[in-house]
Amino acid sequence: MSVIFRAARREDVPLIVAMLADDPIAAAREGDPSDEVYLSAFEAIDADPRQELVVAEADGEVVGTMQLTFIPGLSRRGGERALIEAVRVGASMRGQGLGRAMMLWAVDRARERGCRMVQLTSDKARADAHRFYTSLGFVDSHVGFKLSL
């Protein structure tokens, strides 16, 4: 499988949203992929140098996506952190190693930027994802809290 990683483009947004919604946990959170709210969100992400919305492309088709956020901070000697979110692999590509390739690419991207840490959150119900992240060297060292607004 030959995969390239590139910055998402405006025309990728409906495909990205469809991948986000193709998930039993996230499906209820998403709406119509052609809704203008997604294009507005894309514009904000695209304009922010600390955000990277990335797609994985195989044979010209978008087959995966993730968002990287680079967070400056004083802790860790002023080191930047990379936050990986909204990781999705298209249904046709699941189980073929694309998720691993995506995560390794994201970690390498964080290293290129000089980040001192890569972090992510994962819903407690995603036991398979937790095993996957652990296999990549991630450690479940913290408890996360969220407040929906």
Image (cartoon, rainbow, N blue to C red):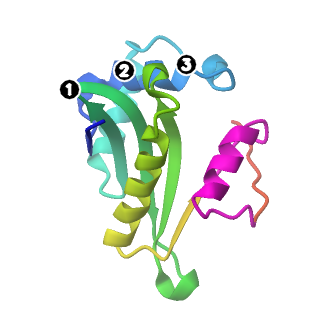
Q: Amino acid at mark 2?
A: Leu
Residue 85 left/right relative to 114: right
At which x and y percent is residue 99? 48, 41
Q: Which residue is found at the position 36% from the left and 28% from the top? A: 63
Q: CA distance from mark 3 to mark 1?
A: 20 Å
Label of residue 60 in the image: 1
Q: Which residue is found at the position 28% from the left and 33% from the top? A: 57
The residue indicated by pointer 3 is: 22
Sequence-earlier tag: 3 or 1: 3
Where disc 1 sits, the SS reads: loop
At which x and y percent is residue 127? 76, 40
Where disc 2 sits, the SS reads: helix
Magenta-colored stretch includes residue 53: no
Q: Nearer the viewer, residue 111 or 74?
A: 111
Where disc 3 sits, the SS reads: loop
At which x and y percent is residue 1? 30, 35
The residue indicated by pointer 2 is: 15
Q: CA distance from mark 2 to mark 3?
A: 10 Å
Q: Which residue is found at the position 51% from the left and 75% from the top? A: 73
Q: Which residues are magenta?
A: 120-141
Q: Amino acid at mark 1?
A: Gly
